[in-house]
Image (cartoon, grey):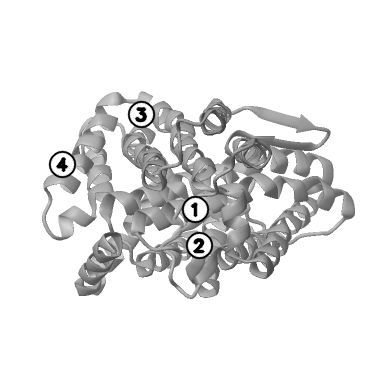
Amino acid sequence: MEKNAVSNTANKEVKKLSSAAKLVLGVQMLFVAFGATVLVPLLTGLDPGVALFTAGIGTLVFHFITKGKVPIFLGSSFAFIAPIVGGIKLYGLPGALGGLIAAGFIYVLVSLIVRKKGIKIVEKYFPAVVIGPVIMSIGLALAPTGIDMAKGNWLLAIISLVVAVLMVTFGKSMLKLIPILGGIIGGYAVALVMGLVDFTPIREAAWLSIPNFTFPVFNWSAIIYFAPVAIAPLIEHIGDIYTISKVTGKNFVENPGIHKTILGDGIATMLAGFFGGPPNTTYSEVTGAVALTKVYSPVVMRIAAVTAIILAFVGKLGAILQTIPGAVLGGIMILLFGMIAAVGVRTLLEARPNMDKTRNLVIVSIILTIGIGGAVLSWGTFSIAGIGLASVVGVLLNLTLPGREDKPAV
C-alpha cells in the first residue's frame, strides 16, 4: 500500500505539470535512450533514422496493446547485434529483416502461452531468487558501457553525474524531475567552453530527410537462423517488467498482464523488421531514469516516442543530439545502471527468499557470474549470451535443484 501511495502521489504531481513541462520530461527520456537506439544500427549497418522511427512507432504500439499503463520505452536491442551482422552476410538485409520478424513472432507465441496458462507459469519459472539477480546483472553488466563512455573525458562525466545527483537530491519542483536532462546540459555546456563539441554532424545534416526504409524478404533459412535469438531478449523483457513493477510499486505482471507486455514487444519487433529497423526491446536505461526521477507517467514515454519519430525525419535535430560528447552520457549512465542493480537488490530483500539455503546461494551466484561476466554459449548458428544465458541457467537451476520455493518477484 505504501508503494502504491508513493506511485499515485508521483503521478498526481506529473498530471499537475503543464504540457510544456511534460514535453521536457519526454525529451529527457529520449536523451537517455537515444545513444543506445542509434548505436545498434551504426554497428550493424542499418539506418539510424529508421531505428528512431521504429523505436517511436514500436513504443506507441506497445502502449496501445498494454492500454497505456506501463511507463516503458522500446529501443534497439543489443542482443541482436551479432546475429544481424551475420544474417546480413548470409541472407542480405531484406532476408535478415524477414528473420527478425520471425523472432518477433516468437514473442507472440509465448504471449499466447502465458495468457492461456496464467500468471502462475511466470511465478513458477521466474521467482524472486531468479529475477532478483537477473535484474542486478542487467545493471551491472551494463556498467562497463557507462564507464567506457566516461573514460573519454572524466571531467565531463563527473560534472554530468554531479549535476544530476545534486538536482535529484536537492532540486525543487520541476528541477527535481529533470536531473538527467540537467546533467547532460551541464556537461554539454562545459564541453562547449572546452571546445570539445564537434558541430560537423549539424553542418552536414539536412533539415528534412527520409529514413532509408528497407522491406523484408522471407526465406526459411533466415527464419531458422534468427528465431532462437528471441530467447535471450524475451527473458530480459520479463526481468524488465518485474523491474519497472518494483520501481513504480505497481504489479504490471498482473495488470495489464505480462502476456500483453510480451505481445506488445513482439509486435513492435515485427513492425521494426517490416520497415528495416533493428528489433525493439524494453530499455533498462529508461527504467533507471524512472527510478531516479520517480516520474511514473506513461504519457511521458509516449511523448518520447513521438519525439523519436519526429527526429527520424528532421536531420538537424537528430544531429544536435549526436554532438553530445560520449563522456557526458557516460556520467549519466553510471548513475542509471547503478539504479537498476539496486532495484535487483531490493527485489531479493523484499521477497526474502531463504538465503541460508545452499540451493538459493548457488542460483544467485551462478546467475550473477554468467550475467555480469558475459558468458557465451554457441551451437552452430545459434548463440545465447550474458543476461539471456544467465536467465536460462537460473530458471533451469530453480526447476531442478531440490527445495524450491517460488516466491514471486512482485
Real-space Cα separation, disc 2 to disc 1, in angstroms: 10 Å
Q: Single out the mark in the foreground, 4 or 2.
A: 2
Q: Which residue is under mark 3?
A: 150
Q: Which residue is under mark 1?
A: 408
- Element on which disc 3 rests: helix
The reply to whether the C-beta atoms of the residues labelled 2 and 1 are less than 8 Å apart is yes
Q: Nearer the viewer, residue 131 or 156?
A: 131
The reply to whether the C-beta atoms of the residues labelled 4 and 3 are less than 8 Å apart is no
Q: Nearer the viewer, residue 303 or 289?
A: 289
Question: Dot 4: few (<14), some (14–19), or many (≥20) neighbours within 10 Å?
Answer: some
Q: Single out the mark in the foreground, 2 or 1.
A: 1
Q: Which residue is under mark 4?
A: 166
Q: Which residue appears at 45% of the width and 47% of the height?
A: 284
Question: Dot 2: few (<14), some (14–19), or many (≥20) neighbours within 10 Å?
Answer: many
Q: Which residue appears at 64% of the width and 61% of the height?
A: 266
Question: Residue 201: x and y, percent?
Answer: 43, 44
Q: Which residue is under mark 2?
A: 253
Q: Which residue appears at 36% of the width and 34% of the height?
A: 330
